[in-house]
Image (spheres, rainbow, N blue to C red):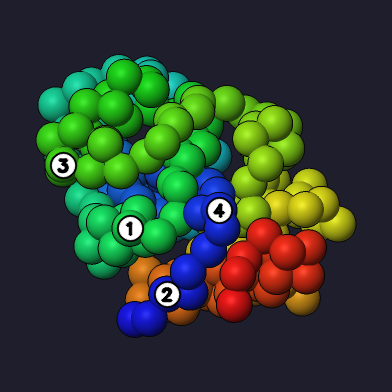
Amino acid sequence: MSVPILGQRPKIGVDFHGVIGQLDVAWGQYFYSKHPEHSLYELTHPDAYEFYQRICLECRNHCQKDGELLASIPPVPGSLWGLRLASKWASLFLISSPVGIDPQHTEDWLKAKGVDHLFVKRIFTENKTAACRENGLDALIDDSPVNLEPLFNTPTEPIIFDKPYNRHVQGRVRVRSWAEILAVLQYVVQQRQQREQQIGLVRV
């Protein structure tokens, strides 16, 4: 993949749960071991977070705090490779919600996978719109409509990581894999280059 030379590296925000790590897989397996009367399909359904709260609040709270269980979260296919490649030409910001997983466990997971150092900043917040604005992010990759829709008509481009529960969100960039993410980010880099050329920041 060829990458344009920039006056300034683009700033890209990346969500953890659903984009980098598959938290629902680990949660679903734990809940199924405690509640075999429910199918594993139910427990890995897109609305599983609400489902967990309905069937067993105690289990949900356990999942949020169990470091061993959270360490077993599988990575989203291609995410570790994608982060390593993207970090060579973009400044990556982890923008993750502290709800559902202790931030320290997220930090531990990233370190165990050898990708913690790829982020210039790791932010844990429920207000991702403010985090994008305060850090001047060019784009945010997320799977939650709650985090994506407030970015419409802002300088931060919302990149939708495709899930069944966000398919009602229309008219925005949608990606289905980390290979597609990298292709889209290349476009973001090129757009920044064009803007910088217009104001004389890049010599051509």
Q: Residue at (59%, 77%) from the top-left corner?
A: 204
Kindly report which numbered mark, 4 or 3, lies closer to the viewer in this rendering. Answer: 4
For label 1, the residue is 88
User: Depth-wise, is mark 3 or mark 1 nearer the camera?
Assistant: 1
- Per the image, label 3 sits on a secondary structure element best described as loop
Residue to which mark 2 is pinned? 3
Q: Residue at x 29, y 63 (%)?
A: 85
196 vs 152, nearest the viewer: 196
Is the C-beta separation of discs 2 and 1 under 8 Å?
yes
Secondary element under disc 4, as helix, strand or loop, is: loop
Q: In the figure, is residue 50 to the left or right of 2?
A: right
Q: Could you tell me which secondary element the residue under label 1 belongs to?
A: loop
Q: Residue flagged by tag 2: what amino acid is it? A: Val
Q: Is residue 133 above or below residue 146?
A: above
Residue 202 makes an appearance in the image: yes
Q: Which residue is mark 3?
A: 114
Q: Quote the CA–CA distance across marks 1 and 4.
A: 13 Å
User: Do residues under tags 1 and 4 come within 8 Å of each other at their CB atoms?
Assistant: no
Residue under pointer 4: 8
Which residue of the protein is positioned furthest toward the front in this rendering? 203
